[in-house]
Amino acid sequence: MDGLSRQFRSVRDVREGNPAVEVDFGAGPTALNSWTKVLDLRPKRGIVPADGPVRWDALDALPQLLTVEWAGPDRGIVEAIAAHPSIKFLYWFDAEGDIDLSATAVGTVRVDGPNVRSIRLPSSIGSLSLGRAPAHFDAKPPTATVSRTLRVDAPGGGRGLDLRMFHYDADVVIPEGVRRASSLWLWVGGEVSASVLLGLSDVEALRLTFDRAPGTITDLAEMRNLTTLRGLQLDEAYGLTVEELPELPALRTLELNGTRHSTSRVAKARYRGSAVSVSVTGAKTDQWLALHMDNPFRDWVHDSKGFGRAACAAYDRARRAADAVAADHPERVAVAEKVLRGLVVDLNAIEDKYHLIDTHNRETAWDAFLDLANRLGVSHVDADRWFDDGRKF
């Protein structure tokens, strides 16, 4: 059957209520459910060709499609989404260049990649996530220049937008075109200056998440200009000095997830009897943090003390073993593989006992694994293979 006949059959099956359709994006026929709502079209997944033209008319057979995942250069993806207004969610990995989504009807967009120059958003936009690969990936780490020159054009300067920025460090810059966002989630390394928040004239909800120790906000006095801020959430901010937080006239909730016991006490005392409600989870003693501050599994104790302690111990063993491998060891690669696979074996045993490694914990485990692989000089390709080969969680 030729491609045109196959397309006609797909459309006819949809009209007749047949849930099974055969589509061809150019990489050969693929059987899908005509009710498909989420579709991973990243070239490496095999549904679309790795390079060359893509047969975007195959989307016509999926009238209920809501979400599309894509990776790499455009190759016609933007035009295809614009021609299918039912698509409301776009997740674009390893993006590059200038991305103009103004003719689409998407409401939620996530764009990852250090080589994006500009993004133009449609009037339908409600949520924008900007991400870039952590520095321990094989890809060349994004530079401050890339971060500072990213241009985003959102209707109304991003007024009412839910803005999220992931995997950034101290060089993070919030693009001018979205500075009227009403909600901001900023995911950074171990430290960030409050000066990056200057110019956020409309922000009502702010969340700062630190993915490395010590979790410190410098120049806290700069937050005094956030006069519209009603909710502040800080995750893993173990270096927070509550006494230096300026008075925020509109603030009504302060949420601390992962903090010191001493910080928790100071925060509750400061806002007691005020209009600000304080919520604290995951408070830890200084003694505990002295032992586990740099352990990526430190917060697994929130799910279960035994689970968290076992995971921390497994990572500590792997880190000590990794640090003991000399740079000039004649069998460095073989030893590195043993260390990394050993961590996966330990995590498998922990999962068998506690059954608590969920999606979030799995991602944390992967990041920790990659960090150790980087220390050992192991390539991303080998690390990916070793992790998946032995993983049971």
Image: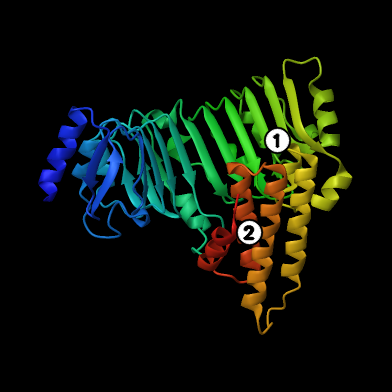
Q: Are marks 2 and 1 in contact (CB under 8 Å)?
A: no
Q: Residues within 10 Å of mark 1 (few under 14, many from 20)?
A: few
Tell whether 49 sits left or right of 382. Answer: left
Name the residue at 68% across, 83% down.
328
**Whole-number angstrom distance, CA of label 2 to CA of label 1:** 37 Å
Marking on residue 221:
1
Inspect the image, locate mark 2, and give the three-letter code of the amino acid beneath it. Phe
Q: Residue furthest right?
A: 287
Q: Which sits in the foreground, 224 or 230?
A: 230
Tell whether 388 sits left or right of 364. Answer: left
Q: Residues within 10 Å of mark 2 (few under 14, many from 20)?
A: many
Q: Which residue is mark 2?
A: 369
Give the percent coordinates (x, y) of residue 356.
67, 41
- Count of residue discs: 2
Q: Which sits in the foreground, 36 or 77?
A: 36
Q: Disc 2 on helix, strand or loop?
A: helix
Give the percent coordinates (x, y) of residue 166.
54, 45
Residue 226 seen in this snapshot: yes
Q: Which sits in the foreground, 110 or 141?
A: 110
Dot 2 or dot 1: first in sequence order is 1
Give the color scheme: rainbow, by chain, secondary structure or one colour: rainbow
Give the percent coordinates (x, y) of residue 327.
68, 79
Q: Quadrant of residue 53?
A: bottom left
Inspect the image, locate mark 1, and give the three-letter code of the amino acid beneath it. Ala
Task: Give above or below for 183 relative to 139.
Answer: above
Q: Quadrant of residue 23?
A: top left
